[in-house]
Image: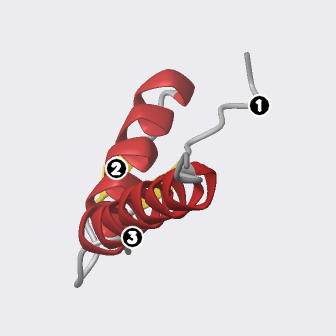
Amino acid sequence: MKANNKGQALIEYILIITLITSVTAVAILVLGKAIRDGITKATCNVTGGKYVEGVKAGTGTCDNIINLEE
């Protein structure tokens, strides 16, 4: 008599996907503010603005100085 392992394989795949999702969510929570600051700094460099560091991580801003006289 053959054993049916399809259900077991499905549960293993679900557990792997759940683990990957959990690790990704934790990484975003931990690194999210640093990533936000990095994107803001890059945007400032591209647009010619000045990056202003915020009080807390993730609160930095970009002061864009637009010269309309040119």
> Which residue corresponds to the image point at 44% horizontal and 48% vertical from the top-left?
40
Q: Residues within 10 Å of mark 2 (few under 14, many from 20)?
A: some
Q: Which residue bears the numbered disc 1? A: 68
Q: Distance between the residues labelled 1 and 2?
A: 21 Å
Where residue 42 sits, quadrant-wise, is: top left
Is 5 rendered above or below residue 65? below
Q: Which residue bears the numbered disc 2? A: 51
* Amino acid at the residue labelled 2: Tyr
Q: Which residue bears the numbered disc 3? A: 22
Circle nearer the N terminus (2, 3):
3
> Which residue corresponds to the image point at 41% horizontal and 28% vertical from the top-left?
45
* Amino acid at the residue labelled 3: Ser
Q: Where is residue 43 in the image (x, y as percent from the top left)?
A: 50, 36
> Which residue corresponds to the image point at 56% horizontal and 42% vertical from the top-left?
65
* Amino acid at the residue labelled 1: Leu
Q: Where is residue 22 in the image (x, y as percent from the top left)?
A: 39, 70
Query: How many marks can you see?
Result: 3
Is 58 rendered above or below residue 9? below
Circle nearer the N terminus (1, 3):
3
